[in-house]
Image: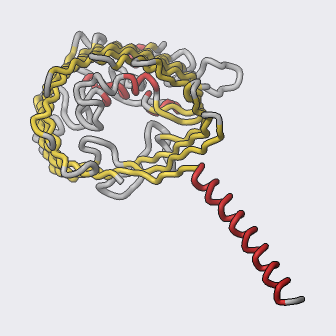
Amino acid sequence: MTTRKVAHALARRSLIGVAVLAATAGAAQAQNVTLFGRLDVGLQFTNKVNPAGDSLSEVKNGGILPSIWGIRGSEDLGSGLKAVFNLESDFGADTGGSRGLGNISGAFGRQANVGLSGGFGTVLLGRQYSPALLAELGTDPRGYKESYSMLLPYALTQLPLGNTGVETPPGPNGLGIFTSNLVSYSNSFGPVNLGVAYGFGEQAGDNSAGRTIALGLSYNGPVTVSFSYQGINGIGAGANDETTRVGFGVAVPFGDFTFKGLFARAEYDSPTPALQSKTDHVGVGADWRWSPANAATVAYYQGKDKNTGGGKTNAIVLSNDHSLSKRTVLYGQFVRVDRDATASAATSIAAGGTPAGQKASIIGVGIKHDF
């Protein structure tokens, strides 16, 4: 072969290689995959953690947000259509160990879903956040922070705790926050956000056992308004057990302040009287952006258990978040909890940390870093 022919052959192969590399690069750019996560850990002191009045000092995971890691991504399919996926897991930044949600543990106990997104909205299949919870993020006084917000009552009122305070196996509903076997649809219509979901119970012979139905609506205009509904069947002793929860919320901005209020009613219906419960929850508060790097919050929560003679838990939370950067926040918070002797654990924003029939104080400081 002549030198000229060899040169032409090499040039032809080089062009083919460039074309392949260009196609590969285009495919890589069309698919976006992100590794993300968060570590939130701090120091916390509680002056009363049991009826004996003992105190507790601890390294606390999830002072304001959960420690998580995950992978999410999307692929451009053309014509405005995308394939999307989410994988998300909890872990304890205090110990480095994994954490289970409800009876779900393992790699991705928070989210494991895939779907399609486009002008029609987004459809997801798999384990995912409840749209009922997502609708209320803007109206809970503390934005559903991991500790000392209405997030804990949200979860506990959708478990068969009842008057006994003892949890029976909850099924795959993930405390009502995350749900397995879920099909969801979400979309925005101007300032209105809609989310609906159906969770398959997947029990042969009874399609209602273990079923979850969830709805979340929010309006984000000059004010924010939220509505939510969630019903879960067959989560306790049998298919006749059912929880229902309805919530209404509002947030009103006024200069550097945002005033918030959220009301929720939750009922657990069971043939077992000891498991039945009916609770009302109210949260009111205000955020104050008093400098570009600081946001202070004052919030008041009350939970009332109508199945135990009106036992109540009242709580006041004072907190401040100081942003060192877009990814790093230093925070401090003080909580005062007053829980009646007859109030169930589900009425409290700090159920696991304060005893019934006593007043307790909690002080915490910590650092949150996102990556």
Q: Quadrant of the N terminus?
A: bottom right
Number of on-image labels: 0
The scheme the figure's colours follow is secondary structure
- Residue drawn at x 78%, y 83% is 7
User: Residue drawn 26% across and 48% down?
Assistant: 326
**Residue 229 falls left or right of residue 118:** left
Report x, y in % for residue 36.
42, 51
Q: Position of residue 309 (x, y in %)?
A: 24, 10
Q: Nearer the viewer, residue 219 or 68?
A: 219
- Residue 232 visible here: no
Q: Is residue 1 visible?
A: yes
| Residue that sits furthest to the right in the current view | 1
Q: Residue at x 50, y 50 (%)?
A: 71
Viewport quadrant of the C terminus? bottom left
For this orientation, the residue located farthest to the front is: 4
- Looking at the image, residue 52 sits to the left or right of residue 2; the answer is left
Residue 362 appears left or right of 277: left
Coordinates of residue 96 in the picture (x, y in percent):
36, 58
Q: In screen coordinates, is 23 left or right of 331?
A: right
Pick whichever, 162 or 42, lies toward us.
42
